[in-house]
Image (cartoon, coloured by chain):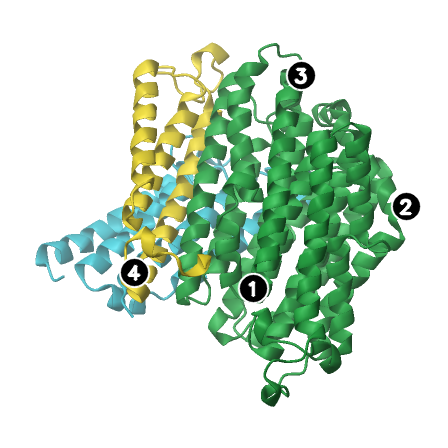
Chain colours: A cyan, B green, C yellow
Amino acid sequence: MNSTILQISSRYLNIILLIASVFALIRGHNQPGGGFIGGLLASLSVIFNSLAYSPEEILKKLRIKPIQHIALGLILVLLSIIPSLLAHKPVMHGIWIKGSSAFLQSVKIGTPLLFDIGVFFTVIGVTLLFFFSLLIKK
Amino acid sequence: MNIIAFPIFFPFLLVIVMIMVRSVKLAKCLAIAGSAINIIGILLIFQQVSKNDILVLNMGGWPAPYAITLVADYLSSLMLLVTAIIVFSISVYAYNFIQEDDGNSKFYVFFFSLLMGVNGAFITGDVFNLYVWFEVMLLSSFVLITLGKRKEQLEGGIKYMALNLIASLLFLAGLGLLYGKTGTLNMAHLAQILKDDQQAILINTSAMLFFIAFGIKAAVFPVFFWLPSSYHTANITITSLFAGLLTKVGVYALIRFFTLFFIQDSDFWHTLLLIIAGFTMIIGGMAASAHYETRRILSYHIISQIGYMIMGLGIFTPLAIAGAIYFTVHNMIAKTNTFLIAGVINKMKGTYYLKNIGGLFKESPMLAILFIIPAFALAGIPPLSGFFAKFMLIKAGFEDEHYFVTSVAIFTGILTLYSVIKIWNEAFLKKHPDETKVHDKFKPGFIDILPSIILGLGSIGLGVFAKYFFEITSAAAEQLLNPDFYINNILNTVK
Amino acid sequence: MEILLAILTGLLFAVGVYLILRRSIIKFIIGIIFLSNATNLLVFLSAGLVSGKPVFVPGGEIAMQADPLPQALVLTAIVIGFGIVVFTIALKYKFFKTTGTDDLDQLQQTDK
């Protein structure tokens, strides 16, 4: 598919989708959003690009391949349980960094956020893997 | 207390490792090492459980009905232990039997995610969480059964997928109705609420949905058709893994649900369970006698033996429940073992059809001995595990005056013996039909029969130390029949 | 509203069951999608509908809130359903490429 409109608009939509995905990821703790939705948005930007150009080309250009995204996400999920183990709390107990700075007031940082980031990367990897394996004909 | 989460997170770690490992040889070694560590961790849990009777962990530190609760009681930890042993033997077996065209290192990723799903299903104390673990297990098994991408595998995969997806949907529907009625999904909390419930008839709707869902997973009588038409298509390693673990998770869920909270309308349910158990046993047994392909005979054996477990649940006396658990443990070990040996025979002779093989007793007496142990254990010959399991169930059946279903069980025992002896005669005793092609290239090495040795020793051990195992299973049955202990332990851990 | 959604759930179940009884594999998969959506709706309805109430209100009263659990359950179920549907479609695609048939009656090789 070679549509100029798609190609030009994908250039701008890319950035918007990626920013929106990170936004959704961070606000997800108490409001609608979260790792899953963020991940879908982020993978959408890649999918949009591959529809505008060609999936093979985009897959080649991806520096981190989908399967590596999955591995990275799963590692982050696993890391997020370690603080709760070290603190002798039940597994997956949320541990937060407390502070009074303006940044920490607006963005809550803790193991649940790490878990969410893990989900974020896993979802990107899984969605892209689905997409590319269904679209690219060997 | 955090050790209860080990059976979930350790396979999870192994999944990540297997995704990242490139070298196939390294993946194979890591899989063996990983499943050995898994056994050690689960032995620790087992030891803790036998000291404290029950272990409870509320994930995330939330109080009990709200958190996802992980519970290890005798039944769970026993199942975990057997699973760990089976997984260890299969990871050893896979060393030679998983080849290039079976996906190789991809196999291990899904192998361990299957283990994670099975372990999770055994220790969770939350109905929705059970659904999630079922799905983890199901998705991994979908991938495993179609890994080689051969034509018959894809066909078997579609059949397997179709019925199991419907089962999952029924499970979810039953769960939704249950939540609508009670407002909770924590098993202990559910049990507490449903105990004093007078409107048992309303619960029956969701109980029936759960029953059909677990029945499909466990392959009981009217809904077992997916099993014999899909299991034999995959690589034999995968088939033996499924034979040992998957249907038993369904049985475990049935035992858990129908002892813990679907106990109001017991007359109806126990009669239904006994009827279904009778049909499952007899049909599985008869189909097994009719077939001449090793994997299909063994697949139908799985079905007929699920019947015994359901029968134990239907009789519902302490001895019967203990017998059902004993039978499940015995069956997991022996069933996996027979499939593993069928795989070795196939590798030696290149076929699973009994008509085309023979003379194995002369060729490899060691293999013959290894086959006779699980086969006779399945048939119920005295010093081996199957005898005690069947004895307990049949004794419980007669004591509780279920003469008809117990006679069916005895008759099925004879059918099982017949079909096992059929394999023995055809594969081991008779002369090879084609004398010119007797000397094949493959001789099973030590690593190929090591899993069978481990599992065979397990079958013998379960028989010889039957007294000790009887005590464990009786303790498990006692816990199951007194749900108050389970309820109190979970709902009081908040303090 | 609940009665309407209950009827819709029933309708979706009916459509799904009709489709999974068809002979074509792709219709079977569409039937599974219908069934899974019907089930999700059923789970979602299990807590009852509360119109216009948020799930979490910091410092709010319990009576002002909707039950969050079915929403979380449905979200999880949708994600799982998503994965399963993709897998089934991929499997069907592969199957069609190897055998060239979409007819469930042709699937008799493994039963013989």
Q: As displayed, is residue B401 above or below residue C24?
A: above
Mark 2 residue type:
Lys
- Same chain, labels 3 and 2: yes
Q: Nearer the viewer, residue A17 or B492?
A: B492
Chain letter of mark 1 equals: B
The residue type indicated by label 3 comes to Lys
Picture coordinates of residue B181, whole percent (x, y): 52, 17
Cα separation, mark 3 vs mark 2, equals 34 Å
Q: Would you say residue A29 is visible in this rendering?
A: no
Q: Which residue corresponds to mark 3? A: B195
Tag 4 residue: C96
Question: In this rendering, which labeled residue sits more in front, label 3 or label 2?
Answer: 2
Q: Which mark is residue B467?
A: 2
In what element is the residue under mark 1? Answer: helix
Residue sitting at x 81%, y 55% = B381
C91 w.r.t. B495: above or below: below
Q: CA distance from mark 1 to mark 4?
A: 27 Å
Would residue B86 be found to the left or right of residue B98 on screen? Answer: right
Q: CA distance from mark 2 to mark 1?
A: 37 Å
- Residue B93 percent coordinates (x, y): 65, 69
**Mark identifier at residue B108:** 1
- Amino acid carrying label 4: it is Phe
Q: Quadrant of residue A62?
A: bottom left
The residue drawn where x is 56% and y is 38% is B215
Local packing at callout 4 (Cα closer than 10 Å; few below 14, some 14-19, many 20+) is some
